Amino acid sequence: MRKALNHLKKNDPVLAGIIERVGHYAIEYREPVFQTLVRSIVYQQLSGKAASTIFNRLKDAAKADPITPESIMKLRPARMRKLGVSPQKLVYIRELARLTRAGEVDFERCLTLEDAAVIEHLTRVKGVGVWTVHMFLIFALRRHDVLPTGDLGVRAAMKRAYGLADLPKPEEMERIAAAWRPYCSVASWYLWRSLDNVGAM
């Protein structure tokens, strides 16, 4: 990781300042399995605390660790709704379970695919968009060069750090991030963490 940090600090003075402020790179990874994608769906458009509560209820109800497609399909939709899963996410999670059980979504295969192919493979599932797959690539597949152009946190951090008038669009993000390649995931993690300390800065 020292190589990545040296590259980022050398090529982008703004990011170098953020790295110095934030400190040690301490990303928390998850396993590249079915449960991780279910978790991402639950977390969509919810605060961390609310999503965590719902996800833990779902995990307890599924009686499986990690959650499997079979354990999801055994849960009645009405039961999932009582756990706090929205009707829309209920459809997404059950569709993901169905496709995974049928072998149409293959998490083992994702390990060997290029990033673009992983995006194509997983976004076939209703409710799994590019942002969700970007998170999966970064936090589960541990890919080092993913720029999550649809992530509000990264966009807000870039706007603030680079003194932009508006939240950057994908083209502007790509232009700024050109100096980070091949370590966009590492840079993005630092941008997320930079927002944690806004009050103290």
Image (cartoon, helix red, strand yellow):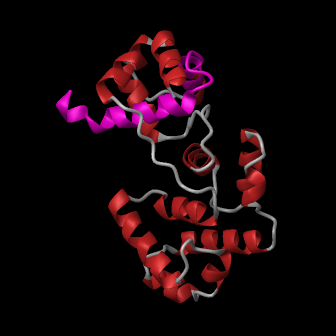
Q: Residue furthest front?
A: 2
Q: How many marks?
A: 0
State the predominant SS element of the stretch in magenta. helix
User: Is residue 103 among the parts visible in the rendering?
Assistant: yes
**Residue located at (61% from left, 80% from top):** 72
> Would residue 192 be counted in the magenta stretch?
yes
User: Is residue 124 among the parts visible in the rendering?
Assistant: no
Q: Toward which corner of the image does residue 73 lie, by quadrant?
A: bottom right
**Residue located at (74% from left, 69% from top):** 100
**Residue located at (72% from left, 59% from top):** 107
The image quadrant where one finds the C terminus is: top left
Residue 33 in the image, given as x and y percentages of width and height = 64, 61
Q: Toward which corner of the image does residue 175 lie, by quadrant?
A: top right
Part of the protein shown in magenta: 172-201
Q: Residue furthest left?
A: 200
Residue 109 shown left or right of residue 20 in the figure: right
Q: Is residue 192 above or below residue 16?
A: below
Residue 42 in the image, given as x and y percentages of width and height = 50, 65
Residue 119 shown left or right of residue 58 in the figure: right
Q: Nearer the viewer, residue 34 or 2?
A: 2
Residue 68 in the image, given as x and y percentages of width and height = 63, 74
> Would residue 200 be counted in the magenta stretch?
yes
Residue 11 in the image, given as x and y percentages of width and height = 51, 11
**Residue located at (49% from left, 76% from top):** 59
